[in-house]
Image (spheres, rainbow, N blue to C red):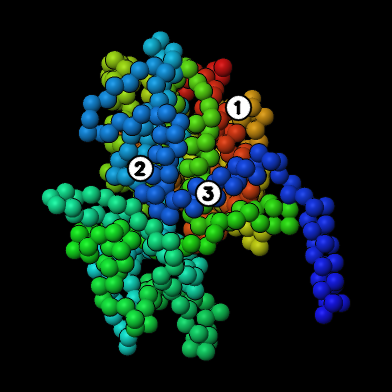
Amino acid sequence: LDWLGKRLFLLERKRVGMVAELGSGLTHEEIQAAEGLLRFIDESPSAFHAVSALRARFDEAGFVFLPEAQTWSCKPGGRYYTVRNGSSIIAFKVGSAVSEGYHFQITASHSDSPLFKIKAQPALEGPGSYRRLNVEAYGGMIDYTWFDRPLSLAGRVMVQIGNRIESRLVSLDRDVALIPSLAIHMDHGVNNGFAPNRRIDLCPVVSAGALEKESLQLLLANELDLHPDQIVSHDLYLVNRQAPCIWGAASEFISAPRLDDLMCAYASAEAFLRSANDSCVSVYCCFDNEEVGSNTKQGAMSTFLPDTLMRLNGALGGTDEEYRRALAGSLLVSCDNAHAVHPNHPEKSDEGNRAYLNQGIVVKEAANQKYCTDAFSSAVFCAVCNNASVPFQRFANRSDMAGGSTLGNLSNIQASMHGVDVGCAQLAMHSAYETAGARDVMLAIRALRAFYGADIQIIGADSATLR
């Protein structure tokens, strides 16, 4: 035993020495940025929680909350934010020199991720004494990644207190459900291909017999310190509580649930809070429902952005003419993660326009304009990065593969302006646990901070001056 103990001690010393020799490859600032993202993800199990976490940061930074249902008062030099549905948020900083004419410099990300939503009547009884939850897919997740993971519940619950209906956030601090795989002995061909049936295969089990049919209502009531009859309705989701982490022999990777798109939501918020620009109105947007098309009252295709910009313009004493002129000179940076080259399937990426982890923010283009990038907007954003000595990459889908869409082209339906699509490179997009580059958090913050800090003077689509 003494010999074994000494041997284990020496092996551990060797391992620690090897790690020290390798080093993390990251600067202290880059490690802090990556750790900050992982904390934000931990705070944000649902879109409602993500917006709550963002509100806390804006409140701490001295921003004034402007409820949509109240009269707004804004002035040059002021900092403000507004919220819709508790799941979308827009914040803005008014430059001190905007009385001489202004434009908007905007980033837009999204607060939602693919999840399984709990139905209004959630209880599935049987077979036997089992209790399961009735769920449906929200967004396009990779279904098989949700199997055999302890899961929790998070979202919002509507409660009635007297004659008042109130919204309460809930996030259970324990695992209460799991979607079990069928044993290989009962499905011998599973490794030859498996397409789960969402109605049959993806119902999470919550009890083997100890719980009754109304146990979810009771569980929520206990969590909120209410009577079960006070719970009126809910927007609840299954949540993967596997802890986000920095990993790798040289600490190159980050993995977490909901990297798409909380990574961009965090990076753009940090850039927004750390930047200053007196010549424009800097705007931060984080919209809900991108994963299901954005066409909701709080989505990027809604009136939320133009409503906010027009009300701001009016509160500053601007006319409709001045608002239209401001839009014409504005630039929107749509921030949503991009596909990195997969190490086992490089053939899935375009030969020349491909992105890698830890090599900087990705500028995304598509001929079908599912990404809003064009030559003008790309040139402006890339020039901003070059001026700040921040690396960037270019991405396009393989020509025989359809890509996804994102926020930029949809928000432009309501508030038209120049737009460019960017994002952080990542692997396993829409998995229950995704992976990206640890260094890319700081690189994205630097790129977007440079964008917010630049005085971008746009004249039509003919020229732009960076000051």
The vertical placement of 188 against 374, above or below, is below
Residue at image point 42% right, 58% down: 114
Image quadrant where one finds the C terminus: top right
Disc ID at residue 383: 1
Give amino acid for label 1. Ala
Residue 443 placement, left or right of 215 = right
Viewer can see residue 14:
yes
The image shows residue 80 at horizontal and vertical percentages of 37, 28
Image quadrant where one finds the N terminus: bottom right
The vertical placement of 182 against 30, above or below, is below
Residue 395 placement, left or right of 13 = left
Residue at image point 34% right, 76% down: 132
Of residues 168 and 355, which is closer to you in this image? Answer: 168
Residue 401 placement, left or right of 207 = right
Instruction: Count the numbered circles shown.
Output: 3
User: Residue farthest to the top?
Assistant: 100
Give amino acid for label 3. Arg
The image shows residue 343 at horizontal and vertical percentages of 67, 59
Of residues 120 and 215, which is closer to you in this image? Answer: 215
* Residue of label 2: 88
Q: CA distance from mark 3 to mark 1?
A: 32 Å
Residue at image point 59% right, 47% down: 35
Label 3: which secondary element: helix
Q: Nearer the viewer, mark 1 or mark 2?
A: 2
Q: Please identify the quarter of the rendering in which residue 151 is found.
A: bottom left
